[in-house]
Image (cartoon, rainbow, N blue to C red):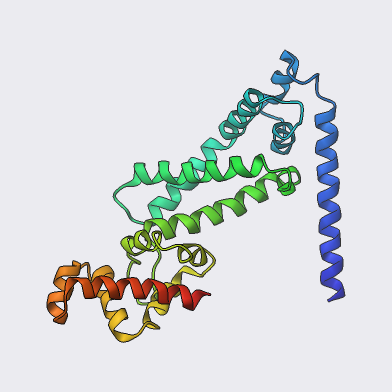
Amino acid sequence: MLDVFLEYEELEEEGRKRRSHFVRLYTAFPPSGSAAYWRALRSPSLPLEVLVLAVRSAGLDEAGRNTILEILIQRIQRSCEYWARCVVRSLSSGEHIALVEDLCADLYESLIRLWLDPHAHFWEENFQHSLLFQRRKIYKRFLLREGFDQNRQGKRIPRSLFSRLEYHEGVISPFETLDRTELYSLVQLLPEKLRTAVLFVFWYGWTEKDTARVLGVTDRTIRNRLRKAFLSLRSILD
C-alpha cells in the first residue's frame, strides 16, 4: 500500500513539474493578442499543453479563444481522423464516411469542453495521454449510440433499443457506466413477458403489432410491457 502511495506521489510531482515547465513557456510569450503572440501560438513545434494554457487565459476574448481552439483542432485533426477511420473500419460497416465524421465530431465537441474547463488540468501536463484517454471514452459512447456493441452471444446490440431508452429519463445515463457486454444479460433478468417483448421487438426486429399477434395480446399490451421493461431496467441499475 505504501508503494502505491509513493508511486502516486511521484506521478503527481512529475505532473506538477511538467505543468510548471509549460507555464514558464507560456509566460515568456509576447503580449497577448499581438501579431508575435499569434505567430508563436501557430508554431507547429509549440507543445499542445501550452495551447491549452493559452485558451484558458483570462486575458482572451471569445474570438481569441475560438481561434486557439481552431489551432488545437488543426494540430490533432489528422491523427484523430486516422483514429476514427481505424475504429469505423473495425466495425465492418458500410457507412464509413458518415460514421467517421460523426465520431470525429463527438470527439471534438468533448475535447473543446475539456479544454475550456480549468479543472481538467491533466491537459496542461500531458496532452497526448489525456487525448488517448478521451478517445477511449468517446469510442465507448459511440458504440453505445450506434448499437455496435456485441453481447456474449455475439449478436449486435440493437441501436433501436438505445433510441427508445433515451426517452426514459434515468435509464440511459446509468448504461454509460456499464460494461456494454452486460446489456444482453440485464435484459435476461427481466420477467418473462417483459423479456419476450423486448427480444421480439428489438433483437428480432418485429413490429409491436406482429409481436402482439403472435403472443395473442393487443398492441397496447406490448407497448405497456416495453414501458415496464424500461422501468425495470432502471430499477436494476439503481
The image position of residue 85, as x and y in percent, is: 43, 46
Residue 144 versus residue 226: which sits nearer the camera? 226
Task: Please identify the quadrant where the N terminus is shown.
Answer: bottom right
Q: Is residue 198 visible?
A: no
Q: Is residue 70 visible?
A: yes
* Side of 143 relative to 8 (left or right): left
Residue plotted at (73% across, 22% down): 40
In the rendered image of this protein, does residue 128 appear above or below residue 61?
Answer: below
Asked where in the image residue 112 lies, by quadrant, the reply is top right
* Side of 73 relative to 153 (left or right): right
The image position of residue 90, as x and y in percent, is: 40, 56
Q: Residue furthest bottom?
A: 192
Residue plotted at (62% across, 33% down): 72
Residue plotted at (55% across, 56% down): 137
Asked where in the image residue 214 lies, by quadrant, the reply is bottom left
Total numbered labels placed on residues in the image: 0
The image position of residue 237, as x and y in percent, is: 50, 74
* Side of 214 relative to 145 (left or right): left
Asked where in the image residue 158 lies, by quadrant, the reply is bottom left
The image position of residue 222, as x and y in percent, is: 23, 74
In the rendered image of this protein, does residue 128 appear above or below residue 195?
Answer: above
Q: Residue furthest top?
A: 35
* Side of 22 relative to 65 (left or right): right
Residue plotted at (34% across, 60% down): 159
Residue 211 versus residue 69: which sits nearer the camera? 211
In the rendered image of this protein, does residue 64 appear above or below residue 5?
Answer: above
